[in-house]
Image (cartoon, rainbow, N blue to C red):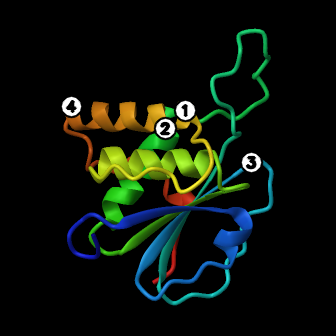
Amino acid sequence: MGMGDGKPAVYHLSRDDAEHFVFDEPFVVVSVTDPGATPLTFVPCEKRRAILRLAFHDLDFAPEDVDVSSWVLYTKEHAKTIINFVLDWRYAVRLIVFSCEAGLSRSAALAAAVAYGLLADALPPRKGVPNRSVFLETLVTWAALQEGGMAHGRWHDPRMLEDHQ
């Protein structure tokens, strides 16, 4: 796996680990925080090409009796943004880093979904329990985009993207 073949490695990290992560090959970061949380502050790294920042709560299939009206849930639009970010960078980087607060649920789900669905390499998460709703929504959205011929469309919101070139 690596740069040029369209199958970069994927990795998931906690907030603290991601903020201090450096790599000697080109990489990008998908940073997931809780809504209203302070955005991650990354140490300088010349090989970091871009950061995609998203905010949604870590909720995995809420019971029917739980009021989630004030929660920001993971949506198809989040999934489209991530899919297109990965597609945009997959030939230019060796690694895609996913981070969330603890590095155990949302980032593990996204890393697993991207590795399994988008890059066609089944890589289990290195730790944690992937958020099932995030994992499934990402794979379902990817399948729908492929069927509709839109997998290479530009669904992401440019306001969420920071380029570091």
Q: Amino acid at mark 2?
A: Phe
Between disc 1 and disc 3, whose residue precedes? 3
Asked if the residue at tag 2 contacts the one at tag 3, i.e. Cβ–Cβ closer than 8 Å, the answer is no
Q: SS at mark 3? A: loop
**Quarter holding the N terminus?**
bottom left
| C-alpha gap between disc 1 and disc 2 | 5 Å
Q: Residue 153 location in percent, x, y?
A: 29, 48
Locate residue 161 relative to residue 8 in the image: left or right: right
Q: Amino acid at mark 1?
A: Arg
- For label 2, the residue is 135
- For label 1, the residue is 132
Exactly how many numbered labels are in the figure?
4
| C-alpha gap between disc 3 and disc 2 | 17 Å
Q: Nearer the viewer, residue 160 or 59?
A: 59
Task: Count neighbours of disc 1 (C-alpha within 10 A) and say few if under 14, some if 14 to 19, many if 20 or more.
Answer: some
Locate residue 131 relative to residue 68 in the image: left or right: left
Q: SS at mark 2? A: helix
Task: Count neighbours of disc 2 (C-alpha within 10 A) and say few if under 14, some if 14 to 19, many if 20 or more.
Answer: many
Asked if the residue at tag 2 contacts the one at tag 1, i.e. Cβ–Cβ closer than 8 Å, the answer is yes
Between disc 4 and disc 2, whose residue precedes? 2
| Residue under the point 75% across and 46% down | 35
Residue 147's mark? 4
**Quarter holding the C terminus?**
bottom left
Which one is in front in this view, the residue at disc 1 or the one at disc 3? 1
Q: SS at mark 4? A: helix
| C-alpha gap between disc 1 and disc 3 | 17 Å
